[in-house]
Amino acid sequence: MPHGTLLCYHSGMNAKEEIDKLTSELRIYQDKYYKEGVSLIADSEYDRLADRLIELEREHPELQHPDSPTKRVGSDLTNDFPEVRHTIPVLSLDKAYSDEAVLDFFSRSIQKEGGALSFAAEEKIDGISMVLYYEGGVLRRAVTRGNGEIGNDVTPNIMTMRSVPLSLPEPVDIAVRGEVYLEKSDFLRLNAEEADESKRAANPRNLAAGTVRRQKSIEAVRVPLTIFCYEGFWSDRSQTPPDHLHILARLKGLGFRINPHLAFFDSTREKAEEKLRSAGLDGKAFAFSDIGGFIREKSAERPSLAYEIDGLVFKINELDVRERLGYTEHHPRWAIAYKFEAPQAEAKLLDITVQVGRTGRITPVAEITPTKLGGSTIRRATLHNQEYIDELELAIGDTVSISKRGDVIPAVESVTEKNSSGNTTFVLPAECPCCHAPIVQVGGLQYCPNPGCPDQVKGRIAYFASRDEMDIESLGPRTVELLYDAGILRSVEDIYTADYSAAASLPGLGEKSIALLEKGVRESLSRPFSTVLSALGAADIGRKSAEMLVRSGFDSIEKIQNGTVSGFAAIPGFGELTGERIVQAFASPSLRKTIEGLRKAGVHLDASQDAKGEDLPKTLSGTVWCITGSFEAFNPRSKALREIEKRGGRTVSSVTGNTTHLLAGKGGGSKRAEAERLGVEIVSEEEFMRLIGMEAAAPDDGQLTLF
């Protein structure tokens, strides 16, 4: 377009017309420049038009377009990052550490589905997970992953990123998941430009994370963040493409940046190539048998990439299969992340013990020589199952390589030296080591089929009473074992009918200890229904899924017992397999017996009972609390969280500009410093107890405590 037609839009126009005209033109120039590298006008002319639009929008803020090109410039106003609840599942991924584990994921998925499947493979970018929410084709919110349910709204900073479309060519309602990252070269340049060494970031991810949370978006502009988008969720499900490849193609067509290093796996390379062509995508096609070579190729290619990756993500391509498989509490069943490496060390295998979990699962555990790894001393490591032991050809006395998978769970990775004693590959016992019932094989796992197995019963009781579930003070695993062996506690429902005075003669259980235990049992009767549902541990229903069930209308134990597979599968993120497990679990006679016992005890089995149990004045309504340090009266700290929530307050895990109060106990560190910086009110334990009308506990007089 000739420059002469652009010199003065405002001549003869009213403010709205001029703003509309400038917005439209500048959007075209931005798209051409940032998507195609084409400059339609001189930089000085572009700057003049942008300055004019900024001037008009300041004078008439009500006329500013929600996708105005000036959003790219950023603002020097301080941002507040409110918490926002996600409308889509934003979960972690299950992990794999070998090509065999990835192939096992492929084969298990195909076996479950009973038919042919294909899989997409994408680089796992080491960045910041982000969800972009568009309404009517306009970006309304950009939200961090947070805890998977609630994240921070960082829209002003994300709007400054040139690779994030502010508006789409179609008026669709869509949520798009992506990974925000900083290229290695930009990271090195920015760190070199930072004169203060203490302010230099340790790696690109840290700098990207800090930029996303800058208080002033004008500061975020200076860091050239970018994004790869990899999942789309349409509000109108009829608009959803049939498979993952077509989702990527659709996202690309809408203007989103997708990773060009796409790989695709099918039973043959020819089938994979055909599906890539059908979707109109560039990518590398592979057969399932190519998985080992592909992983080695990507591992070797990793240092030469322009950005950091820490693994690969493999996903089932077919969306109808994804929906049937659904999700666990922590991850989708239709995807797995291959991690390139984990910290490793060597140790000697002293023995293999066999544990029986609350679900009956038999788990072999490696007992190893004490070994320093990742800042801690490791004495035990998981071995998963017999198949894994066989793969390693593992025998007692072998020298093994161990790692902290995901930097958390110690695991045996390989045998580095065979034992000199002639010991052969370890074989799990044919019988349950606790009740001697014959072990049964379910897929690749072994189970004790006896629900009355003492180890299973103890596990269920301890899980029900644990801090993260019903939080019954002084009823930990060792105390449960002591009471079970004494015949005082033989089931979950016994918790509320047991005669604990009979335990007074047991080691470590004096009168005061028993009084604390009885008090904890009484207090647990007021736990909300969602907590009770999670504590039952049925069908792997955890805290998040229990809350989702209640929010979806399954707000009583009767509704759950009478629920159908299709009813549960209709809940976002559940799927048919989860629905089947829930129906099967709640049809179990032993679980029904437990539920009836809890009903008689007065435990909340209906969400309508919750309000009656916590009918307190909402004196903390409108406040947002964070907690740090340790406390005398609130151990664990979740007790303080419940007191806040019962009184209408909201609790968060970190201090932000939205936090109104920090409850600070002994030893609070970085959270207190951040609260002081932001001017958040800091409340001591004593002040908090006065605020909620709770009396301070009597000083410790040396009474005995339970383990």
Image (cartoon, rainbow, N blue to C red):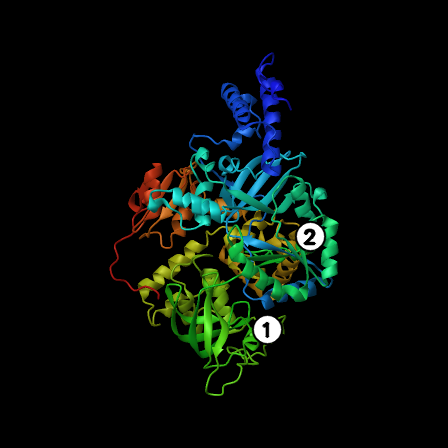
Residue drawn at (61%, 46%) of the image: 258
Q: Position of residue 210 (x, y in %)?
A: 43, 43
Q: Which mark is residue 449?
A: 1
Where residue 64 sits, quadrant-wise, is top right
Q: Is residue 172 above or below residue 627?
A: above
Query: CA separation, marks 1 and 2?
Result: 34 Å
Task: Say what amino acid the circle numbered 2 marks.
Answer: Leu
For disc 2, the marked residue is 319
Figure disc tally? 2
Q: Is residue 313 visible?
A: yes
Residue 372 placement, left or right of 229: left
SS for tag 1?
A: loop
Q: Position of residue 685 (x, y in %)?
A: 31, 46
Q: In this view, does 635 lie above or below 347?
A: above
Give the class, few, some or many, for how many residues have Cα within 10 Å of label 2's Cα (few <14, many ≥20).
some
> Which numbered disc, 1 or 2, marks the residue closer to the eye?
2
Residue 212 placement, left or right of 606: left
Q: Where is residue 218 in the image (x, y as percent from the top left)?
A: 45, 33
Q: Can residue 599 be seen in this view?
A: no
Asked if disc 1 and disc 2 are in contact, CB closer than 8 Å, the reply is no
Task: Say what amino acid the circle numbered 1 marks.
Answer: Pro
Mark positioned earlier in the residue sequence (1 or 2): 2
Report the quarter where the N terminus lies: top right
